[in-house]
Image (cartoon, rainbow, N blue to C red):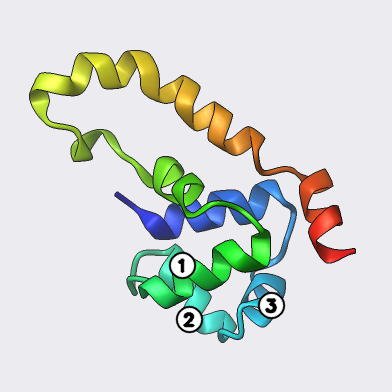
Amino acid sequence: MNIGLAIKAIRKKLSITQYELAERCELSQTSLSQIETGVKRPSQRTINKVCTVLDIPESVIYIVAMQEADVPPSKKGVYELVYPSIKSLALQMVSSEHLALVTA
């Protein structure tokens, strides 16, 4: 599971700069950069703050963060069939229009 990459993917989908998200979450840009690159693991408090700022359920970040390595070998077939659709649905909850409503 790569929470940092998930945050980065969601941030980019919303066309928000790293600086903007860091500022809204009351983080330094360096900290957010370290989270997104996997140098630093985000605390639960940071994950909550990102979700609050972006007005998304925490589950969206965890769905986007899921990787094949997280799945037991016996479940890989189901994962390969279902995960792309689930990830797509989760990302549909995140859009530029959504962000415009949050920041308005």
The residues tagged by marks 1 and 2 sit, at their Cα atoms, a distance apart of 13 Å
Amino acid at dot 3: Arg
Q: Which mark is residue 24?
A: 3
Q: Quadrant of residue 43?
A: bottom left
- Please name the residue that numbered disc 1 is placed on: 47
Q: Is residue 57 left or right of residue 62?
A: right
Q: Residues within 10 Å of mark 3 (few under 14, many from 20)?
A: some
- Please name the residue that numbered disc 2 is placed on: 31
Where's residue 42, x and y in %?
Answer: 38, 72
The residues tagged by marks 3 and 2 sit, at their Cα atoms, a distance apart of 13 Å
Q: Residues within 10 Å of mark 1 (few under 14, many from 20)?
A: some
The residues tagged by marks 3 and 1 sit, at their Cα atoms, a distance apart of 13 Å
Amino acid at dot 1: Ile
Above or below, 99 against 73 in this view is: below
- In what element is the residue under mark 2? helix
Which residue corresponds to the image point at 73% horizontal and 43% vertical from the top-left?
A: 95
- In what element is the residue under mark 3? helix
Mark 3 and mark 2 residues within 8 Å of each other at the beta carbon: no
Which residue corresponds to the image point at 56% horizontal and 86% vertical from the top-left?
A: 28
Above or below, 72 against 5 in this view is: above
Q: Residue furthest right?
A: 104
Q: Is residue 62 left or right of residue 17?
A: left
